[in-house]
Amino acid sequence: RKAAAFGVSFDTDRDTSGASAIIDTEKQSNLLHQRKRLPVTRYQREILYLLEKHGCTVLVGETGCGKTTQVPQMLLEAGWAAGGRSIACTQPRRVAAITVAARVADEQGCTLGREVGYKIRFEDVSTSGVTKLKYCTDGSLLREMMDDPLLTAYSVVMVDEAHERSLSTDLLLGLLRKVLVQRPDLRILISSASLEAEKVAGFYDARTVKTSRKRPHQEAAGNDDPATALTSSDPGNGKPADLSPAILSVEGRLHPVQVHYLDEPCSDYVVTAIESAVNLHRESVPGDILIFLTGQEECERAVTLLEEEAGRLRRIGGKNALRIMPLPLFAGLPAAQQALALEAAPRNYRKVVAATNVAETSLTLEGVTFVIDACHVKQKTYNPRTGLEALLVAPISQASAQQRAGRAGRVRPGHCLRLCTQEAFSQLQQATVPEMQRSELAGTVLQLKALGIDNMMRFHWLAPPPAEAMVRALELLHSLGALDDDARLSKPVGCQMAELPLEPRLAATLLAAVRFGCGQEIATICALLSVHSVWASGGGQRKAMEEAQSKFATAEGDLVTYLNVWKAWEDSGRNRKWAERNLVSQRVLLRAADIRNQLLYHLRRLGMEPISCENEVSAVCKAITAGLFSNATRLEGTVYESVDADYSGTNSYSLVRGTGGQAVRLRIHKSSVLWRVRPSMLVFHTVQQGPSSWHEMQDVTAIQPEWLPEIAPHMFQSVARPRPQPGGM
Ligand code: ADP
Ligand code: MG
């Protein structure tokens, strides 16, 4: 295993022989030295003091100042996890929860999953009764509230990365506000990398109290001595806290970052980013380069391009020249590869990391002095009129761009190149719209209902979602049978759906599958839809990949294709070699196997025994229809457009349920096995917004028109036949 001090080690079977103990001690003191130098460490007294005094404390500090890794350890060491309760620290991203927990376990010198653990959906690496500090996704803490609404297992909940304003973070903040009233002994620490603090604090109380480094606690707490908080032998001893929230700003040590813009807009930001990186590299100024792109595909493409350039440069530069070390960084990356991007580069190498916005604030990279920002991000958008939630590559906000630029100033003054003109930059919106206001809310509403909160409109939202989106969510849940006519959680279906750790449509699919006698198959499909792609992304070998996929492809569509992959893998005895040969990811399939078991466990806990339909594929497709009928589309005709060669003669679909009078153009995404097949009717799992206002459907399943009125008569009265002639767009 890795001996490097920065290594994220995920192995749990530590060698306890003498030699490794010495290395560990050295590593520990190394880590301790690093920890001491972090800006947040200087604020330990203030943080502990405010936490003791106030029910809610807002902590603001630059990315990398130590909020996520250090503050929970301070609480741990001050005794907040004594007496059987533990400390939770929430993250909007799974990858951050895992990585940070591993780092902190290292710093504490413990095995990950013991004193320090993590919990994300479908993966709990913590030990009950032993784990004192748990990093979890905001979503998984929400799930815990279903069993423990007052979060009695915790003495402190730290809501981290609050500036990201993820859907679950916003929801959690709204709920914690209610919990605090009933649990005066609970402490909430909200940490943020930007100055949204005032707003958040105001949300917890109108009487905002401020403190600063120079005058710690004075305004906040009269003449009390912060030292008493430190010496208090029994922190969080159930004493009620001051109900007014406190704000503490940690002054970081960010070096100035000079920002540059393009003179002319660029047509392909991946190519421009690589050219810029190579130019920077040639100028031989020291420091690593971080490139912000939007998704896995782009990151992999960038790495491929960089590898070509690196080879060329090596041939010109000779033996001793500084070399480029291209690395990707995105959420689905295996842990070992991720660690490479986070660690310092080896001597004689310059890291060039092509990252998604996980590197914006969630993960800190060492040694970056140049940031190249494509100024785009892949994010959710929701149109309540059409009821479609889609992933969309959109320009980032200025606030986000500022965060990204900041990544260049951690070690010394840095540079940031934004791949747009200054003019275009000035047109960007100031701040990112909170996810709550651009998401489909069915899952959120279902969760709130399950927590007994029935009046959504009166719930205290940090940013209220559009009323229209709320109405849509209620409609969808009603059509799925989760709500009764009075909009209350139905029994048993609504309650069961809320119990299952799946979004409402998939939860409904799984429950229907049990009725249709294909619970085993749909559990597999739901598991496979809950992981990153089963196909091993083989940078560039597009053709080989298509061939591999075609072996499993069926006319029923992508979901049944996944099922075929799964069955073949099972038949091989879950053989790694088999997986390699067929270009599927062993790692992802193993994870899916685990998720599948959990789903089956949930069903059994709800008193259901899922069986297999053997080879009765139509049962599987019907169950899929029973969950996804709101995503049913019919083929309208063929549209010829010259702009997009791949799609020339594009199949054009429309939503069967209608789109509230709005024109929506849907087509099958290129990655689908049905891309060229164009069935007359299908249901999709997700859509992505593509070029020229096309919505591209992913994970599609062909269905029979008569199934819709049969399976969802409340939505579709008559047989929903495709229209005879191609409709106009
Ligand atoms: P914040 O939450 O304030 O952004 P963190 O607590 O995440 O800051 O990180 C503090 C410092 O710890 C970082 O500057 C980085 O140097 C170091 N660090 C954190 N996680 C890792 C890791 N996985 N590998 C190496 N260094 C890390
Ligand atoms: Mg952090």
Image (cartoon, rainbow, N blue to C red):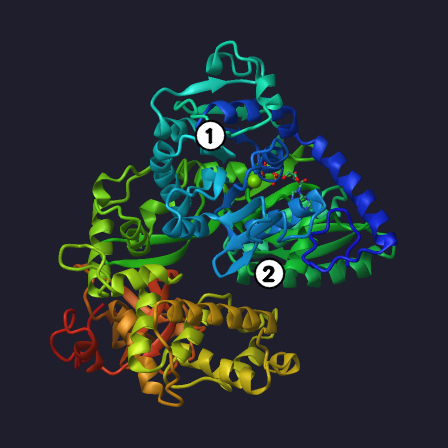
Q: Is residue 254 visible?
A: no
Residue 674: quadrant of the picture:
bottom left
Relative to 329, residue 400 above or below? above
Q: Is residue 13 left or right of residue 662?
A: right
- Identified at 27% across, 73% down, the residue is 626
- Report the front residue among 21 and 137: 21
Report the number of numbered marks. Answer: 2
Residue 455: quadrant of the picture:
top left
**Amino acid type, label 2:** Leu
Q: Residues within 10 Å of mark 1 (few under 14, many from 20)?
A: few
Coordinates of residue 263 in the picture (x, y in percent): 53, 42
Relative to 580, residue 6 above or below? above
Coordinates of residue 669 in the picture (x, y in percent): 40, 71
Coordinates of residue 458 in the picture (x, y in percent): 22, 39
Relative to 200, residue 4 above or below? below
Ligand 2, what quadrant? Answer: top right
Which element type, helix, strand or loop, lies under badge 2? loop
User: Which residue occupies the extreme left position in the image?
Assistant: 717
- Identified at 71% across, 42% down, the residue is 367
The quarter in which the N terminus is drawn is: bottom right
The residue carrying mark 2 is: 333
**Amino acid type, label 1:** Gly
The residue carrying mark 1 is: 238
Q: Residues within 10 Å of mark 2 (few under 14, many from 20)?
A: some
Q: Is residue 51 visible?
A: yes
